[in-house]
Image (cartoon, helix red, strand yellow):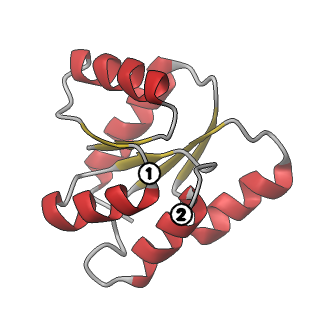
Amino acid sequence: MLLVDDYEDALQVWSLYLQTAGFDVLTAPDGPQALALIAEHRPDVAVIDLEMPGVSGFEVAHQLRERAETHDLPLIAATGYSYPKQLDQARRVGFDVVLVKPCDPVTLVAEIQRLCAAGGR
């Protein structure tokens, strides 16, 4: 799985938690690195922060949905946004699940497991 967040502390804490939960975790601090890692490693699922400098999580999802090889990649938005407009926009660009931070770790793990079991979109 891939975890993407520009906030280094969040990236480290969530990565450790997800590894403890049994996941192999790749991390990226920004959109361009996320896109490169996805192309190279083809993770089962990606958890992406929406608000990142440069290439936002919205744009990452849009690019992934436009590409045939990543169109079905399960995507989870983990965001500090709580306004319905931004949450709706996340769903429109292709996120399968939208979780508002701070999100419950058990819920995040359950959503990752559910999406992986479903095998994509």
On screen, residue 71 versus residue 24, left or right, reads right
On screen, residue 104 versus residue 85, left or right, reads left
Q: Quadrant of the N terminus?
A: top left
The foreground one among 79 and 114 is 79
Tell me the residue that label 2 is attached to. 55
The foreground one among 13 and 33 is 33
Q: Position of residue 120 (x, y in %)?
A: 32, 61
Q: Position of residue 24 (x, y in %)?
A: 17, 34
The foreground one among 24 and 57 is 57
- Local crowd at mark 2 within 10 Å, few (<14), some, or many (≥20)? some
The amino acid type found where label 2 is placed reads: Val
- The residue that appears at 84% across and 50% down in the rendered structure is 84
The amino acid type found where label 1 is placed reads: Asp
* Spatial CA span between label 2 and label 1: 7 Å
Tell me the residue that label 1 is attached to. 30
- Count of numbered circles in the view: 2
> Does residue 44 sit above or below 25 in this rendering?
below
Which is nearer the N-term, disc 2 or disc 1?
Answer: 1
> What is the secondary structure assignment of the residue under circle 1?
loop
- Local crowd at mark 1 within 10 Å, few (<14), some, or many (≥20)? many
Q: Quadrant of the C terminus?
A: bottom left
Q: Are marks 2 and 1 in contact (CB under 8 Å)?
A: yes
- The residue that appears at 19% across and 23% down in the rendered structure is 22
